[in-house]
Image: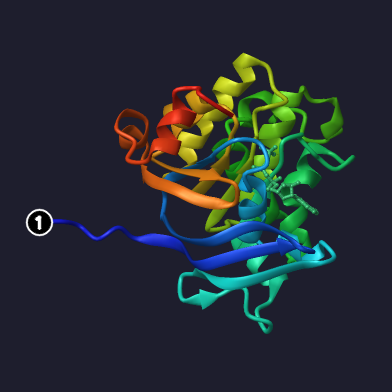
Amino acid sequence: MTTAIDNALELKSLSLWYGEKQALNDISLAIPRRRITALIGPSGCGKSTLLRCFNRMNDVIDDCRISGDIFLGNQAIMQPGSDATALRRRVGMVFQRPNPFPKSIYENVVYGLRLQGVRDRRILNEAAERALRAAALWPEVKDNLGQNALTLSSGQQQRLVIARAIAIEPEVLLLDEPTSALDPISTLVIEELMTTLKQHFTLILVTHNMQQAARVSDYTAFMHQGSLVEFAETDRLFTAPQQRRTEDYITGRYG
Ligand SMILES: Nc1ncnc2c1ncn2[C@@H]1O[C@H](COP(=O)(O)OP(=O)(O)OP(=O)(O)O)[C@@H](O)[C@H]1O
């Protein structure tokens, strides 16, 4: 008996142009719910562009045109009437460089809830603790929640930014090379964190680091020149790639 995979997101023939330049070419892909999906491929292949489609961050880029669609559950998120702000509450994002606000640790974590109009101190306190625990930061900061977030180490700042993203309980968390600015120990902490976060969230990880993709992800999509070349369970993609281009990339022949 086969079990149908529950998908959080589905891309249907997605193409994207920056002006005349086509950066994504007819991508169809289903992203499994509560799993980690890694996007890998050589520099410029379109990984970050694709990641930004999931929460419509490309909307702010002039001259960017998209065809096809992405479904979050049964909602078509690329349609003109679709609300990007509401979408970003459901699809959070963490960037390469930690970007906490110059505010206290506490105010960083509750930022999204305050924006949603939550005023009740007890609710804010509980949400802050829950998010900081989930981001594996609580023991280190619980006695200093009023401290400025910019005084934390970069590894702690990245976990704080993850806590800020998950405090509003999104369904999907986008991670754009979240460890590339971190030292090896902080990287390991974030990798372990990702594997616990997938119990509650769907994670999509852009990484240049193939070992990282192999270590943490359940599924991997290999992209090349704007196209999706291969998508498979990570173990299978790395041990028995079906496409020559995938094999060349993972064996280091280019990229
Ligand atoms: N804002 C933009 N305007 C015009 N072209 C862009 C823009 N952003 C990206 N591109 C181009 O789109 C293509 C895909 O870029 P993208 O950053 O998505 O690739 P990537 O795989 O994430 O690369 P890297 O691994 O180097 O970060 C590249 O040719 C890039 O130059």
Observer-nearest of 235 and 239: 239
Q: Disc 1 designates what residue?
A: 1
- Which residue shows up at 58% across the image and 56% down it? 169
Residue 175 appears in the rendering: yes
Give the quadrant of the N terminus.
Answer: bottom left
Observer-nearest of 117 and 6: 6
- Which residue shows up at 61% across the image and 43% down it? 175
Q: Is residue 239 above or below residue 165?
A: above
- Which residue shows up at 29% across the image and 33% down it? 240
- Which residue shows up at 85% across the image and 43% down it? 101
Three-letter residue code for mark 1: Met
Observer-nearest of 253 and 6: 253
Quarter of the image holding residue 140? top right
| Residue 192 in the image, given as x and y percentages of width and height | 49, 28
Q: Secondary structure at mark 1?
A: loop
Quarter of the image holding residue 143? top right
Observer-nearest of 188 and 221: 221
| Residue 241 in the image, given as x and y percentages of width and height | 34, 36
